[in-house]
Image (cartoon, grey):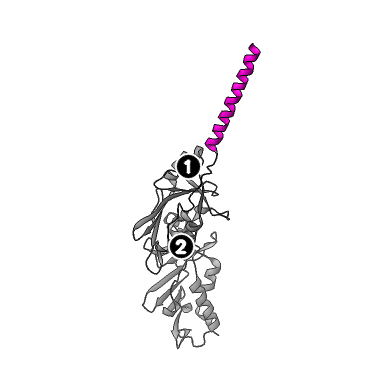
Amino acid sequence: MQEKRNIQLLISWGVLMAVAGVLLYLGNAPSHELVDKDLFRVVDQTEVDHFTIQKSGSELIEIRFDGSKWMVNNSFEADRQLITVFFATLLQAEPKRAVATGQRDSISQEINQHGVQVKLYIEDEVVQDFKVIGNDRKTETYFQLNQDNTPYLVTIPGYRVYVGSVFELTPGEWRDRRIFNFNWQNFKSLSLSHLDSKNNFTVSFQDQFFGIEGLSQADTTRLNDFLDAVSLLQASRFIELNDTLRWERSRNQQPEFSIQVLDIANREYALEIFPRVPEQSSVLGRINRQTLALFSAQDIARIARKRMDFKR
């Protein structure tokens, strides 16, 4: 009798364990419900005229189209390639699935507390509003609509890329890294000044050609190479305010040389280059007497010219 009872208990125990296992699996299994692939897209990207990005506790980044170019916080021209990457990411990224029920609350809480809020506007009307966060290893990205607490794993089909990277850029990283961003057809003059004034020179448009003022026999090949190097010069990165102390030693020195460019409207573009500090691999520069930036030593070497470098 006792043996029969024990068998019944074992059968009941086995059934309970099987049911518990099924419930546990269902609670943690990924959802296979059909997901709207357009959940985080806008109907027509070309109508979007500005967007904002803000990480919790950080500065709001506003990037707005002014009719001819995208501007960062109404102060600096945005990097056009990054603008392309941003909109391409939104166009191609798709929610793969909703986060599994067992992880949903914790990931949603993390997004709400530490995520990046993204808003897209058309004529000051919000047309998309969602939050983004990535995992610690920067291998997975989650989007969540602002009016919902359901996070979705988002991927770009066919690519193994970290989707969240473009939403984590700082204001300085959004900025166009070109320094002399002007039209050469509007070019009036370029002056390069050294500590030793005998090495100074000015390039201007003379008789339909660029020439060195006061130097009748300038080497036009070297001059054109120099002007190309100046026009293509880009900063490696802009220095954020919280990182300026690291470059205090360079900034306190006299500039090794400086460049001033004037266009036909007499707008000035200025760049000062400071002596390279031995323990630093990059060269410090100051743009328009206010913004600090780092440059590759090779790029600076291409523009560090003296007057006699152009003599035939």
Label 1 SS: helix
Judged from the image, the secondary structure of the residue bearing numbered disc 2 is helix
Q: Which residue is mark 2?
A: 83
Alpha carbon distance from label 2 to label 1: 28 Å
Which residue is painted at 50% across and 80% down in the image?
307
Vertical side of 29 occupied by 232: above or below: below
Along the viewing direction, whichever of 175 and 279 lies nearer the viewer: 175
Type of the residue with mark 2? Ile
The reply to whether dot 2 and dot 1 touch (C-beta < 8 Å) is no
- Residue sitting at x 50%, y 77%: 227
Query: Image height check: is 306 above or below 118?
Result: below
Q: Quadrant of the N terminus?
A: top right
Query: Where is 186 relative to 152, above or below?
Result: below
Task: Judge by depth and name the residue closer to the eye, 192 or 12.
Answer: 12
Write the residue at 59% across / 27% down. 17
x and y percentages locating residue 152 in the rendered image: 49, 46
Crowding at mark 2 (Cα within 10 Å: few <14, some 14-19, many 20+): some
Give the image location of residue 216, x and y in percent: 49, 88
Does residue 221 appear in the picture of this structure? yes
Residue holding disc 1? 107
**Mainly helix, strand or loop, the magenta region?**
helix
Kind of residue at badge 1:
Ile
Region in magenta: 1-28
Name the quarter where the C terminus is drawn: bottom right
Magenta highlight on residue 9: yes
Q: Is residue 151 above or below residue 183?
A: above
Nearest the eye: 34 or 301:
34
| Picture coordinates of residue 36, whole percent (x, y) | 48, 50
